[in-house]
Amino acid sequence: MEDPLIPFVAAGCVAAWVGSRTILDRARCAKRLPYPPGPPQLPVVGNLLQITDFEVYKTFAAWGKTYGGIVYFHLFGKQYIVLNDLKTVTDLFEHRNGRYSQRPDMPMVGELIGREENSIAFQKYGQGLKDARKLINSWIGKSPTNGLTPQITASCHKFMGTLLNDPEGFMDNARFALGSMSLKLTFGINCKTKDDPFIHLSEKMQHLTTKALKPGKWLVEFFPVCKLANVPSWMPMAEFKRWSEDAKRQINEAIHVFFDYTRRAVLNGEAEACWAAGEMLDSNGNMKTGEEAERLAVTCAAMYAGAIDTTISVLHMFFLLMARHPEIQRRAQEEIDKVVGSDRLPEMSDRESLPYLNRIIREALRFAPVAPLVVHSLDEDDVYEGFLIPKGTAVLANIWAILHNPEMYKDPEVFNPDRYIDTKDRPAEPDHSQAVFGFGRRACPGSHFALANLFLDFALILSAFNIKPIKNSAGEEVPPEIKMIDGHTRAVQPFKCVIEPRNAEKAQLVRQAVSAANESSY
Ligand code: HEM
């Protein structure tokens, strides 16, 4: 813990709280139904000592083998349920979505830095969230790209240009390409370089949110009853309070910086076509103000936040997988060459004609789910298969366990795009890759957009470039290792690979596409 409060105050509160919770819980269970099964718990800390693994979803999956698809545990009395298989997740998050669309209380990220109010993903379920999701759906919710193909294509082409000119910087360049496309589509902001102040501001917001979400970092997450969140920030050890106040201020300021940029452009008659500009005026042509404008500003800011860490994680993983699997890369290139020919680059309209590439996308999503655990909650008690699920429980869908279930996927730790087709030796395995986008009424509203973007990036990269492992001093190729950074989304640890054009003609096609993209208004 970085910010421990006065230890004896905390200890007293903990003991009192956990004691009262335990008595209440026992009384409740005696009268009512049992909680789902789970591993044995210690007094006070509950299951804390059993979830020290940094890939905690693997621990949960192992619990699933002993206790079944639905597992109960607690940390300092805070109640959790893990759903380890597709059936339980579908039963609760999809079939009972009216009940399981809430987010649990998250004191640091939700309350203290204000993301319950100034984001979509951490917002409590209610009319405000429904309205925001409706708006996002009208921008990007429909299949396949909601008329955004030219914008996505221009952005992907510019990214291809950076692979030619700065292949070693591919990880940062990919992030910049996605981030700048997001700011352009949402606010009409044109970012030319990675040092653009709007990019910096967006990244700052991501960084603050990620820090607030870091598991185990904040004592306040576990002891809401002590009202740690309410301690005055001047107290000597209330560092977490001072940090969160500052983070909240920075996030709120940033949201308004973006929004005000577009508002000024609209008022000056200079606004580029973008989502924010399209929504700012009411039906009488007057600028929206007050709560309405505030809600719009928050919804717009959510687009960068929702898109960046998720999509970039898949894109980085793709480079890594291609460097590790030259035979898969070659097969995909052969498919693309056959369909596209040699005198043009792939386009969005080629999507249906490239089944092997589409299997690579599915398999990349399954192999390394970006958000291995997705958390929902409920506002009233529920009963499932005879077990009590108390209101307020953090209910975690273990997406990693679902997509790595050895009963469904042979050798789940192997990257194998062919697992989805029938062979003479075995039937096709099911495609549940959509699970990586979450479930029910909280499912990702950006999934169609993300998949279209990933398709075009993957197709263009494979069409024009070879991705290879780097060589060691003995001249041998050393495939990059799969190493992840865990957080609320999983990120690929920085790695190196060789990216070079397949031939001079492909490099020329990329240059032409980049010039056209730079000349376009996208
Ligand atoms: C590969 C890319 C992506 C992945 C894997 C992904 C995954 C997810 C997941 C797992 C959730 C939580 C779902 C749940 O609670 O059940 C989510 C929520 C969300 N995503 Fe995505 N996402 C991706 C791309 C995007 C993009 C491109 C956007 C927007 C442009 C976006 C916007 C959002 C928003 C606004 C939410 C919050 C929804 C809510 O809480 O109601 N995502 N995403």
Image (cartoon, helix red, strand yellow):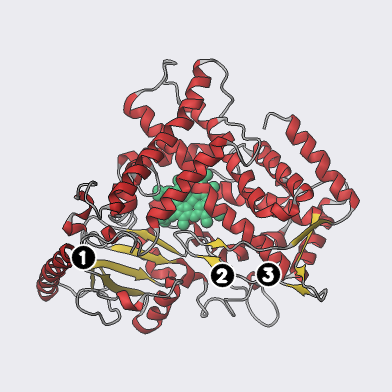
Q: CA distance from mark 1 to mark 3?
A: 44 Å
For label 2, the residue is 430
Q: Report whether the residue tagged 3 is closer than 8 Å to ligand 1.
A: no
- Give x and y (percent) for residue 350: 74, 49
Write the residue at 52% across / 59% down: 434
Q: Give the answer, above or below, for where 128 lies relative to 506.
A: above
Vertical relation: 158 (above or below) 311: above
Q: Where, by quadrant of the figure, is residue 155 drawn?
A: top right
Q: Amino acid at mark 2?
A: Pro
Residue 56 percent location from the top left of the image = 42, 72
Residue named by callout 3: 480
Disc nearest the viewer among 1 and 3: 1
* Label 1: how many Cα within 10 Å (few below 14, some 14–19, many 20+): few
Q: Earlier in the sequence, mark 3 or mark 2?
A: 2
The first of marks 1 and 3 along the sequence is: 1
State left or right for residue 461 relative to residue 427. Answer: right
